[in-house]
Amino acid sequence: MSLSEQQAAALSAETVVVAAGRPPRERDEPVNPPLVLSSTYFGTGPLGDGDRGYGRYSNPTWDPFEEALGQLEGAALPGLLYASGLAAVSSALSLVPAGGVLVMPSHSYAGSLVMATELAEKGFLELRTVDIADTDAVLAQLAPAGGRPASMLWLESPTNPMLGVADIRALTAAAHAAGAVVVTDNTFSTPLVQQPLALGSDVVLHSVTKYLSGHSDVVLGALVTSDAGLRASLLHHRTIHGGIAGPFEAWLALRGLRTLALRVERSQASAAVLAERLRTHPRVGSIRFPGLPTDPGHERAKSQMKGFGSVLCIEMAPVGGLSGADAADRMIRALKLWLPATSLGGVESLIERRRRHTAEPASVPDNLVRMSVGIENVEDLWADLEQALATLGG
């Protein structure tokens, strides 16, 4: 591939997203890695075994993306690509020993919470949920007096959808002191905004479906670590449980990765503008966005992030006899440019009331609206929000 670990370390992340994972610079070779569609590889039998063997173990189309993501996260090893974000979650949770203790944010990606809860109900692990922004509360769950210490600390920062910000440095240090492995879901931030490995995490998780691929056309997940032993365990889980990526999806994800820096720069800037305007709108009861100086996670985010992300949440105020949830639904139906849909991190701006999903924790307010800001012109996005909010009257 085109970049060594040392070369990648000397370049900005904005350059690595473009330069990493390229084929060798040889005459008449393509500048992009090819798409390889094969379930098996020549080299088995009397001529001796090859390095790949079978399509569930490896695919040449995975390699460039895995190398690029590992370099972006500052890892010493390539990442691991999975069939979905939840396949990556499943693999990461397999690191919890049988009967071990998992500490997880009470507000985090619903799929992660559901999977962890089901594992706990079946007796595979003990689950302790906690407000991840409350450092003292997390410390108490990691090593409770008279209780068993945690085996794994699961972090999201900012959290989905409440945008709580964890003190990653302090929590990873405490988790390691308790003997726990730390997994950090970095989907919202991307490696351009936050690098959890440098902050002490052992494993970083991504829903590649979101910002990394960036075009709402693939479903993939990924894990990254610098620990060879952890990587070997995760690779074994992927191979045996079959949560492998399709080569075409991997190829599309690498193509999407090339524009990550531009997309993140644009969407972050627009999110900051929209958050400031929504903050004072009379139809908005409250707003969550770490980029606002008034946000409780602002100073912490400044200390460990290179930006504030492109997701913001508002809680709609009741108006004209409508509850906040009904006002949110009516406002969303009136939008013409924003797309009412789940997911986030694509080029298009998406919006939804999160509690419409039954898996969302009941502690998420039913009037909370999550907004994933895309790369459209910010004034067009604002005009659409403004006219939709105006339909509420009041």
Image (cartoon, rainbow, N blue to C red):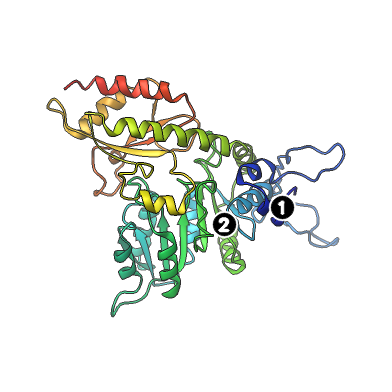
Disc on the earlier residue, 2 or 1: 1
Residue 216 visible here? no
Residue name at image x 22 percent, y 29 percent: 283
**Residue 156, x across and y down, in percent:** 41, 54
Label 2: few (<14), some (14–19) or many (≥20) C-alpha neighbours in 10 Å: many
Tell me the number on the disc at residue 224: 2
**Residue 296, x across and y down, in percent:** 30, 49
Mark toward the viewer: 2 or 1: 1
- Amino acid type, label 2: Val
Residue name at image x 57 percent, y 39 percent: 261
Question: As displayed, is residue 107 above or below residue 381?
Answer: below
Tell me the number on the disc at residue 374: none
Give the image quarter of residue 17.
top right
Q: Secondary structure at mark 1?
A: helix
Tell me the number on the disc at residue 7: 1
Nearest to the observer: residue 62 or residue 134: 134
- Amino acid type, label 1: Gln
Query: Is residue 27 toward the left or the right of residue 308 in the image?
Result: right
Q: Real-space Cα distance between discs 2 and 1? A: 19 Å
> Quarter of the image containing the C terminus?
top left
Give the image quarter of residue 328.
top left
Give the image quarter of residue 277.
top left
Query: Is residue 302 toward the left or the right of residue 320 in the image?
Result: right
**Residue 89, x across and y down, in percent:** 47, 55
Query: Is residue 313 toward the left or the right of residue 175 in the image?
Result: left
Q: Secondary structure at mark 2?
A: strand
Nearest to the observer: residue 138 or residue 248: 138
**Residue 80, x across and y down, in percent:** 60, 54
